[in-house]
Image (cartoon, grey):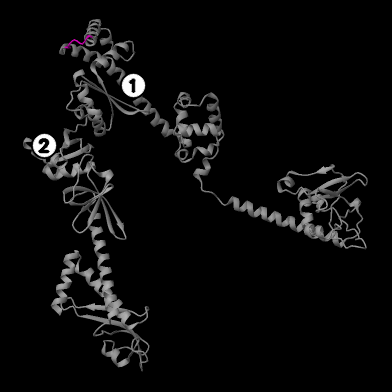
Amino acid sequence: MKSEFILAFNEICEQRGLPKEEVFEALKTALVSAYRRDTNISAQQKVSVDIDPRTGEPTIYTEKEVVDSIFDNRTEVLLEQAKREGYPEAVYGDLVMVDSTTPTFGRIAAQTAKQVLLQRVREAEREQLYEDFSGREGELVNGTVQSVSGQHLTIGLGRTEAILPKSQQVPGERYRAHDKIRVYVLEVRRTNRGPQIFVSRNHRNLLRRLLELEVPEIYNGQVEIKSIAREAGQRSKVAVLALQPGVDPVGACVGMRGVRIQSIVRELNDEKIDVIEWDSNQHTFIAKALSPARVSHVFLEESFEDGKTAVVIVPDDQLSLAIGREGQNARLAAKLTGWRIDIKSLTEASGESLNNLDHPAADKAVVGNEKLIEAVKQVLAKKEAGRPITSEDYYNLDRLVGGVEGKIIASRAAAFEAERKVRAEARKAIPDQAWQLDLEALDLPGRIHNLLLDADIETVGALMMTLSLGEDAFLNIKGLGDKALEVVQEHLANFDGWEEVEEEPQAEPAVEEAEAVAEEAELEAEVEEAEEEAVLEPEMEAEPEAVVEVEEPAVAEEEAEAEPAEELLEPVLDDLSQSLIDTPVVKAPPKKKQEPKPAVVIARPTATPEVETEEDRRRGRKGKQLVLDEETGEVVVKRKRKGSRRRPEWEEYDIDDF
């Protein structure tokens, strides 16, 4: 029985590729689950399992309380037994781990143990697979095509499978089931069903890994791969550099009689591979990248609008070879070097040079050589007539292009370099905080703001740098003119938001808010005092008279419109000065038939016929107005009340109406 356990245990570890420690942990978890299911103990009670690795004998320990008499043997143990279990200092009430191994489990408990064991083993296997393949991202793996569908291929990698998407397949390659292929591990994702592996056949690093396998000098570090440009299934270019003196990088990659490179070509289904030597001189490197075509001149210029551009001049018979089929050779050379390549024939460049003889940057010695210019014109005439051109003719064309076209491009490159230095100096003069401020901080007009964003000017610093380069740099932006320039300069001159970037926001708003609350509280207190004085002092010696507004006769309107006297006072007191607050107010006696709710109104001797401040309009308190009664000469409060159903329109009521 013991030998069968050990054999089964070792078989699981070998088949699943798992370490013994993880399988032991899974087995312990399964036994704990089976014991809990068999004894139906609480989930809070501790249970542990110990397995002898040599014999496979399990021992189950459960946590029990030491008692003098047992009521439930699943959770309690006698003091004598606890001391025999290795707790000589145990006392009543202690919790001890006691051996509770059962001879057998029930059927349901055994099924539970089996399910838990299988689940833990699967989880451990998935985690192990993920750890294995996540460390192999960017490497080559050998696989077998298992199934082919319209969207992707399923590649078997031994214990798991990989997916080769349609976008990562090589156009023109045909795959059949059980084919052996090499793939590049692109990405490994963790999922609930195990690791999901994506592989590629058209990635450029696939060629890099194949070169490392076939060329020992690359694997050992004697030769370095600088860059790779690949169009999968058609053609690739590789730039290599020797790091050790005396090593030929191209010869090491090609191998004797092309043995090394031919094995890679067969692996990639006859994909053409050009191996060139990398050079720090960009003129030489670009000329080599266009191989097998011969190059006459390479002129380099780097502008802010077009980026890095290389103008390549080739002989007429090399033009189609330099461009390649459908521009493939030039496209791969541009990817390999990182330069935008503009290829011209020698006769085309010569014709342009003849038109630019009066350019100030042209070489004076070449421009003044009438014999050379006449010879070039004859060569161009022979080209148009379809007659053959000799090597001497090409030499004359080459001299003219180098002295005119080359000098013009060199002058533009020098101007770009000078502008780059000016930009660098201008950038140093702009504070760093300006680059952190969005363009919205200037509050520019919407049209100017949108045009600046279209020109990739998104910060205040970028705008300041554009202006520092001169007005022409700003006016060259499409849609902006002199008026827009004046508006932008005015906004920049009046901008004072630099402190907001330097200093952190302080607690001043909170202090101001607290002061506002305190002032409002004082105003409310003064309102209450004025109301009390109006109620407690029925007769005053002062001259101002009191005006009282009584309730409406309609009961429904009384309930809808009734408000506390304090609310009636607030809009009035908000508009009056402190001197008016102290004005005495007298409460008029109510009528006999009704007990109208008093509404205290403050009168003043001089007032305009209608007073409504901006504060009232802002707060929407248009229902209460101070008006001058022409008959009595007093200022009274007139309220607008909404009419009832019998009076759909608004009507105004005054004290005289009653």
**Foreground: 442 or 650?**
650
Q: Residues within 10 Å of mark 2 (few under 14, many from 20)?
A: many
Of the pair 141 and 472, the residue shown nearer to us: 141
Q: How many marks?
A: 2
Q: Position of residue 289 (x, y in %)?
A: 20, 30
Query: Label 2, label 1: how many angstroms apart (C-alpha)?
Result: 40 Å
Specify the segment rendered in magenta.
385-389
Is residue 161 a member of the stretch shown in magenta? Answer: no
- Vertical position of residue 119 compared to residue 561: above or below: below
Instruction: Determine the image quadrant of residue 400.
Output: top left
Left or right placement of residue 503 versus residue 308 in this view:
right
Q: Position of residue 98 (x, y in %)?
A: 29, 85
Q: Amino acid at mark 1?
A: Arg
Residue 295 placement, left or right of 151? left
Q: Position of residue 253 (x, y in %)?
A: 12, 38
Answer whether residue 386 is magenta in the image: yes
Q: Which mark is residue 55?
A: none
Q: 363 and 271: which one is in front?
A: 271
Measuring from the top left, give residue 104's x and y in whole percent. Answer: 24, 84
Viewport quadrant of the C terminus: bottom right
Residue holding disc 2: 254
Q: Which residue is mark 1?
A: 412
State the residue at coordinates (23%, 39%).
Answer: 171
Q: Secondary structure at mark 2?
A: helix
Asked which quadrant contains residue 194, the reply is bottom left
Residue density around tag 1, few if under 14, some if 14–19, many if 20 or more, within 10 Å: some
Asked whether disc 2 touches disc 1, contact meaning CB atoms under 8 Å apart, the reply is no
Q: Earlier in the sequence, mark 2 or mark 1?
A: 2
Task: Determine if residue 563 is in view.
Answer: no
Tell me which secondary structure the magenta stretch mostly adopts: loop
* Image quarter of the N terminus: bottom left
Residue 45 vertical position relative to residue 518 in the rendered view, above or below: below
